[in-house]
Image: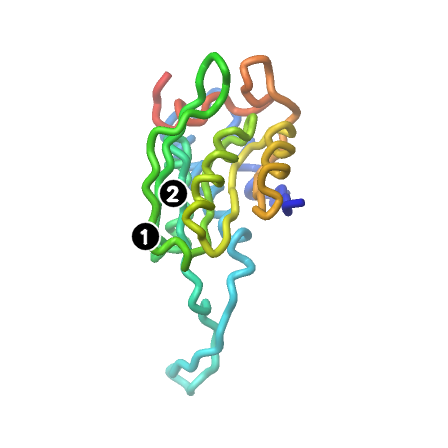
Amino acid sequence: MSKVMIFDHPLIQHKLSILRDERTGTKQFRELVNEIAMLMCYEATRDLPLKDVEVKTPMETATVKNISGRKLAFVPILRAGLGMVDGVLSLVPTAKVGHIGMYRDPETHEPVDYYCKLPSDLPERDVIVLDPMLATGGSAIDAVTSIKKHHPHSIKFMCIIAAPEGIDAFTKAHPDVELYCAAKDRELNDHAYILPGLGDAGDRIFGTK
């Protein structure tokens, strides 16, 4: 069974409350998505290994900690996942960024793949997949399945809001992938939108309808 972490940090919850508000405009919504992604990334990278190195301070030589050889890659699921990229890159600016394009068929609610471009050295990298919403779990499951074919060192999935149905489906499909989300909402409606949710994350990030 995969590890599921639901964040209760006051800063994340406060920002999420504004994110949900239908009165929040595109500019502020986009900024909040990046801020929440950055705060979540702080925790999702907690297990990166460290090594001792020596540096010379203005006072003396000190033994300090550096990240030990592990490389990161962020893979947003297009298009809404793009809204989280700047936030995570502000913490890990040397990470590479891949992209997976999927859309949800309006009739079947199933994901349809249309694009995949990943770093060539993925086996050397720990991958964090980004998508603001985990609804049915279909896109997330397919994205992780595609990434696994490239044999990354490890995979984590990071979303802002998740439905119970999506969490269940994802953890059953990928029990080896850690799942991070800022909120577990109540349910999906008949159109597979999360309730109470925040609407369509892609439309609200990019100002489209």
The location of residue 6, given as percent across then percent down, is 63, 42
Q: Position of residue 186 (x, y in %)?
A: 66, 25
Q: Name which residue lies at 53% across and 51% down.
A: 44
Quarter of the image with the C terminus in it:
top left
Name the element at disc 1.
loop
In the current view of this chain or complex, which residue is farthest to the front?
Answer: 149
Q: What residue is disc 1 on?
A: 120
The image shows a total of numbered marks equal to 2
* Residue at image point 46% right, 22% down: 200
Callout 1: 10 Å neighbours few (<14), some, many (20+)? few
Residue placed furthest toward the bottom: 60
Q: Position of residue 26 (x, y in %)?
A: 38, 26
Distance between mark 1 and mark 2 Cα atoms: 19 Å
- Looking at the rendered structure, which numbered label has been put on residue 85? 2
For the residue pair 100 and 66, the one nearer the viewer reads as: 100
- Please, what is the three-letter code of the amino acid marked with disc 2? Val
Closer to the camera: disc 1 or disc 2?
1
Q: Nearer the viewer, residue 109 or 21?
A: 109
- Name the image quarter holding the N terminus: top right
User: What is the quadrant of residue 54 in the picture?
Assistant: bottom left
Residue at the (40%, 81%) spot, across then down: 55
- Depicted 92 relative to depicted 184: above or below: below
Task: Give the x, y percent position of residue 193.
Answer: 54, 20
Q: Disc number at residue 178?
A: none
SS of the residue at dot 2?
Answer: helix
